[in-house]
Amino acid sequence: MSSALTLAGLRKSFGAAEIIRGVDLAVEDGERHAIIGPNGAGKSTLYNLISGRFPPSAGRIHLYDTDITGKKAFDINRLGLTRSFQVTNIFARLSVLDNVRCGCLYALGHRYAWWKLVGRLQDVNEQTASILRDIGLWEKRELPAGLLSYADQRALELGIAIAGGANVILLDEPTAGMSHSEVEQAVSLIRRISEGKTLVIVEHDMGVVFDLADRISVLVYGEIIATGTPGEIRASTAVQEAYLGTGAS
């Protein structure tokens, strides 16, 4: 199976502090891959390197066969990689519909043109409606996004993330702050929207991780100490000692 995302010798330093220390990782095309680790392990920094927010200090990043090392975030997005953030990142004053519609425009070949009325772009409107129905927000499409509940805002962010048609989706703690029932709904949504795509997820809820992931990588102090199936990670003594706690089941 080919790799959708490959990290080779990836490093990132801020001054004298080395945060990412030689990460090697291959995420297979179509798999759901979780990255776990304690606070301060470097998970968000790693995401920022992959998605183009930060340039790496060393190493290479490949999206399929394309070297995306050091590329701008919008260029990486247009090559087929999208991400969500720990803190909900939506256009609060725009309607739910317009939030998703904005994400569809470039992917469907539309560029800035002052003479075009977005509301008359049939392909954009059809794609937007399909996404809103899929994430369960069609009935709330006219609401300002800032008035949605927290869980609905997270669902909307997922909708925006997939609107561009990316094949590789990076989610950063998508269930943080949710109730048990909201987590169940979020996991079901993530499973549905990532069908046929490659998913990389950073998540602290181990129930979510072991439920969703095909493989798991454990990041500790900027280094991956283990990669394997959920069963292999559960059984790893090194992981139990470094993250899950000695003797964890």
Image: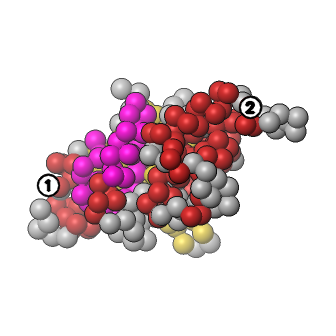
Label 1: element kind = helix
Q: Is residue 135 visible?
A: yes
Label 2: element kind = helix
In the image, residue 208 lies in the stretch drawn in magenta: yes
Q: Callout 2: 10 Å neighbours few (<14), some, many (20+)?
A: few
Depth check, mark 2 against mark 1: the one in front is 2
Determine the image quadrant of residue 43. Answer: bottom left
Span highlighted in magenta in the image: 185-214
Location of residue 78 in the rendering, given as x and y in whole percent from the top left corner: 65, 37
Direction right: furthest residue? 115
- In the picture, measured across the screen, residue 66 lies left or right of residue 28, that is right
Query: Residue sitting at 61 percent across and 46 percent down?
Result: 97
Location of residue 55 in the rendering, given as x and y in whole percent from the top left corner: 64, 54
Q: Nearer the viewer, residue 85 or 66?
A: 85
Q: What residue is disc 1 on?
A: 235
- Give the residue type at disc 2: Arg
- In the picture, measured across the screen, residue 110 lies left or right of residue 210, that is right
In the image, residue 69 lies in the stretch drawn in magenta: no
How far is the residue under mark 2 from the one under mark 1? 56 Å
Query: Residue sitting at 35 percent across and 69 percent down?
Result: 38
Q: Reply above or below: 38 against 3.
A: below
Q: Nearer the viewer, residue 2 or 206?
A: 206
- Return the disc, 2 or 1, that comes first in the chain's sequence: 2
Looking at the rendered structure, which numbered label has been put on residue 188? none
Query: Residue sitting at 38 percent across and 45 percent down?
Result: 189
Looking at the rendered structure, which numbered label has been put on residue 120? 2
